Amino acid sequence: MPSEAGERLATLEQMAREGADARHDMQDTQDAHTLQLAAIREDVHEIKETLAGFQGFWKGAMFMLTLLGAGIGALIATVWHKITGP
């Protein structure tokens, strides 16, 4: 009887060690996933900043093209006026 109790105790201790190892593995996996998620969030933030900068550049470029178009239009009107007279 005592050897049977000892075997059961050893089995229970082994199961407890395996459970603790599994918990540690799960915690390590969760920590790794948390770090990956933080890295992804940082990358998304950088992409948003880049896109916002590009959007600002695009708006500025369109404004400059509008001014260029207005300048060309004024030049054409001036030349037309000089050719056709008053």
Image (cartoon, rainbow, N blue to C red):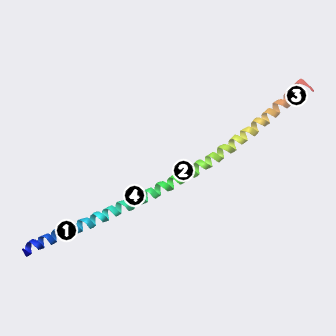
Q: Amino acid at mark 3?
A: His
Circle number at residue 36: none
Earlier residue among tags 3 and 4: 4
Q: CA distance from mark 3 to mark 2?
A: 50 Å
| Residue 35 sits in quarter | bottom left
Which residue corresponds to mark 3?
A: 81
Decide which of tag 1 and tag 2 comes sooner along the chain.
1
Q: Residue at x 42, y 57 (%)?
A: 36
**Secondary structure type for disc 1:** helix
Q: Secondary structure at mark 3?
A: helix
Q: Residues under labels 2 and 4: Cα distance?
A: 21 Å
Give the residue number, with chain letter if any, for mark 1: 14
Q: CA distance from mark 3 to mark 4?
A: 71 Å
Residue topped by disc 2: 47
- Closer to the N terminus: mark 4 or mark 1? 1
Please tell me which residue is depicted at 78% across the width and 36% down the height of the picture: 70
Tell me the residue that label 4 is attached to: 33
